[in-house]
Amino acid sequence: MDVRRYRSGALHFHDFVIAADARLPELGINRSAWEEAKRIMGEDTATMCILILDSSRDRPGLPVKNPGG
């Protein structure tokens, strides 16, 4: 995201969509599940879900242990 912000000087929501998409393999989320989530919830909501899952993996006390589950 830093590279995208450096190029244009500002971030746009689509930059977050691209970041969420890039996180899928590390989170263990199948691309087909991502595509279905975007279809059902809409791209904005699905993106926020991925980013929240990613940030919650290391949450003290109650981490998300299997974000792809």
Image (cartoon, rainbow, N blue to C red):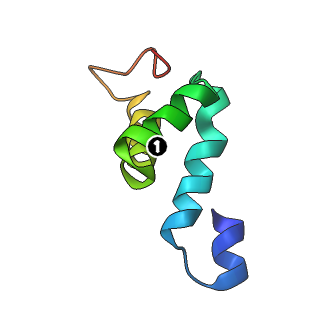
Tag 1: Cα neighbours inside 10 Å, few (<14), some, or many (≥20)? some
Tell which residue pokes out farthest to the front in this image.
39
Q: Is residue 50 visible?
A: no
Where is residue 23? Give x, y as percent: 61, 38
In front here: 7 or 41?
41
Q: Say which residue label 1 marks.
A: 38
Asked where in the image residue 58 lies, by quadrant, the reply is top left
- State which quarter of the image contains the N terminus: bottom right
Relative height, residue 8 to residue 29 (above, below): below
In front here: 30 or 63?
30
Q: Is residue 11 left or right of residue 58?
A: right
Tell which residue pokes out farthest to the left in this image.
61
Relative height, residue 11 to residue 18 (above, below): below
Relative height, residue 3 to residue 23 (above, below): below
Tell which residue pokes out farthest to the bottom in this image.
9
Where is residue 54? Give x, y as percent: 47, 36
* SS assignment at label 1: helix
Relative height, residue 52 to residue 27 (above, below): below
- State which quarter of the image contains the C terminus: top left
Asked where in the image residue 32 lies, by quadrant, the reply is top right
Residue displayed at 35% across by 21% down: 63
> What is the three-letter code of the residue carrying label 1?
Lys
In front here: 65 or 44?
44
Q: Is residue 62 visible?
A: yes
Residue displayed at 49% across by 33% down: 36
Where is residue 34? Give x, y as percent: 53, 34
Residue displayed at 61% across by 33% down: 24
Q: Is residue 49 left or right of residue 68?
A: left
Where is residue 59? Give x, y as percent: 35, 29
